[in-house]
Image (cartoon, rainbow, N blue to C red):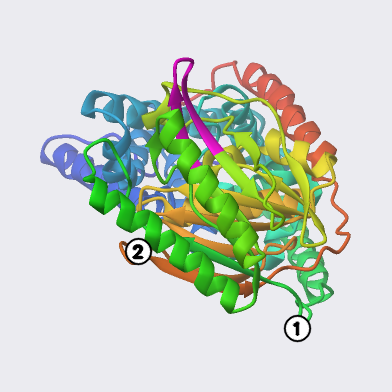
Amino acid sequence: MSMLNTLSAPAAGGTALRQRLLQIAAALAAGLPLYWVLGPQPLGPLAWLAPLPVLWLALRSSRRDAAWMTFLAALLGLSSNFSYFRLLMPLPAVLAVTVAKALLWLLVVLATRRLVLRYRSGWTVLAYPLLWVAIDTLMAAFLLDGNWGSLAYSQTDNLAVLQVAALAGVPGLLFLLCLLPSALALLLAGGRAYAPAAGAAVLLLAAAFAAGAWRVQGAPAPAPGGPLAGLAAIDDFIGPATPPARAQAIWDQYARHVVQLAGQGARLVLLPEKIAVLAPAQADAVRQRFQALARGTGVWIVLGIGVQDAAGRRNLAWLFAPDGAAPVSYQKHHLAPPEREFLAGNAYAVQPVVGQAMGLAICKDMHFAPLGRAYGAAGAQAMLVPAWDFQFDAWMGARMTVVRGVENGYAVLRAAREGMLTVSDAHGRVLAERTSSAMPGSTLLAPLPAALPVATWAGWLGPLFGWLCVALGVILLCAGRRAVPSA
């Protein structure tokens, strides 16, 4: 069997330039599908096949050509994040992050190529998914932004396969997603020798889809006539330069939204993250106003606010009870790049709300599986999540949060400025959703997902599988160190 030199055969004279141009065109063509799946709004169905051209090119080319073509394709794919990254980072940092991510693609694809050509065995179909899960696990554990944008999240709207997250979390979901292009690449480049491995991969995927579809089919629909939840968001931020009259108008509009939603039957109203950053005296005035509003309307209210005092800045979520008691306060744990100067919290908050145990988290907190697991272990049946997105990442921010609910068996209510208002259940079904807007803002009224026991294994199997892939990934990298003849 020969996988090499189809696209790297020696050329002489004028044909050398023609061949190089063909290789560049092939690399760009291979990177185009990645462009549509590596950004903050990925095309979920395409993610199953997008890596296939890159893998096939690598297996059919010399090592040198495979390296530069993979890197070029990855750069093209990752360029879909450029506009979003520019909102968060200066240009040099954007370029550095993009190159670093492209180098990860280079590492995984070249390591996969080396192992396939070194051993020429069906088990090497596992190399590509194992290595990506290993890298994703390390990123989730050690980077400040975790595994934001993991390809696994592209499948959040695919309810059948999403149920894998209830079994093995994001590691299991990512493994399945990477297994198909790996199997097809080996089959196309290596021929019938890899047919058994490709067949086994397809059977595993079919079983996962069938089991997931059965799980979702058995999930009950929200009971008619049950309690309602209201969500509201106004994109406008109350900052230091906001005129007092404008700031007052925004607060008044939020109060009107609460009254309106309560009048429509909402038992709970969720408002977004960090509506304003205020000094203690100003924050206390807001606290008193919404404390009285909760008592007057008879609804629970969750409000996101920043408070700056002598100790520093804190990003808080306040939960106001209908009895007018002092609010439960939660401090954000994981801070987004623009708020690195804020103080990070470390406490959790689970309270009985509308007959359910509900946890509080803020936006980026729900991008981290350990925090989601902590709330699952604490018995949360639903999560209340004020958020603030950046428009480009509205879908990704909402769907990463949905996955936490599937992993841990709880519903999620998320209200984001410059994002989406989303209500999802423990199976990842988005029951209601609406895009936020500027003044006068957007509201959403939806049935509160029922607090039903939903069994999951992701709390222990997900981390175990992820770190097992890290260990196996190290072994694979070491096993493939011997140079490949003709490579």
Q: What's the residue type where badge 2 is placed?
A: Ser
The residue shown at (84%, 37%) is 460
Q: Are marks 2 and 1 in contact (CB under 8 Å)?
A: no
Q: Looking at the image, is mark 2 or mark 1 earlier in the sequence?
A: 1
The residue under label 1 is: 225
Q: Which quarter of the picture shows residue 340?
A: top left
The residue under label 2 is: 437
Q: Please name the predominant secondary structure of the magenta segment in the image.
A: strand
Which of 484/13 is in front? 484
Asked which secondary structure carries label 1, the reply is: loop
Which of 26/81 is in front? 81
Q: Position of residue 148 (x, y in %)?
A: 51, 39
Q: Which quarter of the picture shows residue 212?
A: bottom right
Tell me: 276 left or right of 138.
left
Q: Position of residue 53 (x, y in %)?
A: 43, 51
Q: Position of residue 154 (x, y in %)?
A: 53, 55
Tell me: 143 left or right of 225.
left
Q: Is residue 190 visible?
A: no
Quarter of the N terminus within the rendering: top right
Q: Against 290, is 15 above or below?
A: above
Read off the magenta span.
305-316
